[in-house]
Amino acid sequence: MRNGGHVNLDDTIPPISWREMEAILATLATTETKRIMVRHLVEGTRKQAHFLTPGGVMTELFYIASAMLDVRFSPSTSDIGGSEASSLSSASPP
């Protein structure tokens, strides 16, 4: 991965903005309610990112992607509240 102290660009993930990540995750959402949740979940993850390792941030984003793709996970609109939805992302592994 490192040559003479330099990171090989082929070994890194291209940079992506939080807005771009939110758009990608929204495309994975299988329902409108999940699309609404994405905004809150990504915002919660963004706020936690300063306290997580890069791998931890990626894990959180993968958890969100998994929830968006899970057809058995079917939240109702009453499950979404501003402050509650932003804390749905788990800061630790299940």
Image (tube, grey):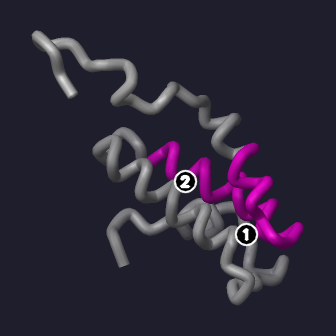
Amino acid bearing label 2: Gly
Residue type (three-letter) at the residue carrying disc 1? Gly
Residue drawn at point x = 77 percent, y = 54 percent = 26
Q: Is residue 18 above or below residue 26?
A: above
Residue corresponding to mark 2: 44
Which quadrant holds the N terminus?
top left
Against 61, is 15 above or below? above
Q: Nearer the viewer, residue 84 or 74?
A: 74
Element on which disc 1 rests: loop
Question: In the image, 18: left or right of 26?
Answer: left
Image position, residue 61 (x, y; %): 52, 54
Residue 24 belongs to magenta span: yes
* Residue 21: mark in rendering: none
Separation (CA) of disc 1 from disc 2: 13 Å
Is 21 or 79 nearer to us in this picture? 21
The answer to which image quadrant residue 19 occupies is: top right
Q: How many marks?
A: 2
Circle number at residue 81? 1
Residue 44 lies, in percent from the top left, at 55, 53
The percent coordinates of residue 90 (x first, y second) are 44, 68
Magenta stretch, main secondary structure class: helix
Depth check, mark 1 against mark 2: the one in front is: 2
Quarter where residue 81 is shown: bottom right
Range of magenta residues: 23-48
